Amino acid sequence: MARVDFYVLERVDERARHTLACKLAEKAYRLKNTVYIHAKSRDDAVHLDALLWTFRDGSFVPHGLSGSGDEAQASPITIGYEQQGIESRDLLINLSDEIPPFAESFPRVAEVVTADENCRLLSRRRFAEYRDKGHSLQTHKL
């Protein structure tokens, strides 16, 4: 069973959610972990790809966009939005509204939640689904 951490932000905006995902990916990279960031859509994945270069001055987070070539799969951090063909890594950062079907193959999952009511409602559903499957759950209020 995976360990699932819910990071609950006080802010409503999606930019704060994406920035926290970048920070989590950077921390995992520094700990020599591999990461897959699962975005809601292609547009979000492209946005996260750009944000990982700029979210913090002096930050270096090597990454690639899934589907952009073989080198993306070799990157310690991969960003994508598709539901199939995802290889397991050390950490899944889920920014989707649902639990992706491949989540079971990851030992750790990070769910990033904003203060937006719809985002919280959907995260409660994911929390219950993870709990019902027997995963170890932690909540971090930020």
Image (cartoon, grey):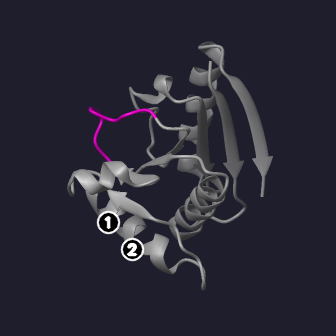
Tell me residue 35's x, y (percent).
50, 47
Q: Residues within 10 Å of mark 2 (few under 14, many from 20)?
A: few
Position above or below: 135 against 81: above
Q: Amino acid at mark 2?
A: Ala
Q: Nearer the viewer, residue 64 or 97?
A: 64
Which type of secondary structure does the marked residue at label 1 adopt?
helix
Q: How many numbered discs, if any?
A: 2
Q: Is residue 57 above or below residue 71?
A: below
Quote the CA–CA distance across marks 2 and 1: 6 Å
69 sits left or right of 118 in the view: left
Disc 2 is placed on an element classified as helix
Residue at the limit of the structure toward the bottom, as seen here: 57
**Which residue type does callout 1 highlight?**
Val
Q: What mark, if any, has residue 50 been given in the picture?
A: 2
**Residue drawn at (42%, 65%) of the image:** 48
Q: Magenta stretch?
A: 81-88
Q: Nearer the viewer, residue 104 or 26?
A: 26
- Residue 43's spot in the image, x, y percent? 29, 63
* Quarter of the N terminus within the rendering: top right
Look at mark 1 in the image and give the residue it sits on: 46
Q: Residues within 10 Å of mark 1 (few under 14, many from 20)?
A: some
- Label pair 2/1, CB-CB below 8 angstroms: yes
Residue 101 appears left or right of 29: left
Q: Residue at x 47, y 24 (%)?
A: 105
The residue closer to the viewer here, 44 or 80, is 80
Q: Is residue 61 left or right of residue 70?
A: right
Q: Quadrant of residue 98?
A: top left
**Residue 39 on image: x %, y %:** 40, 51
Q: Position of residue 19 (x, y in %)?
A: 57, 68
Instruction: Name the image quarter holding residue 5.
Output: top right
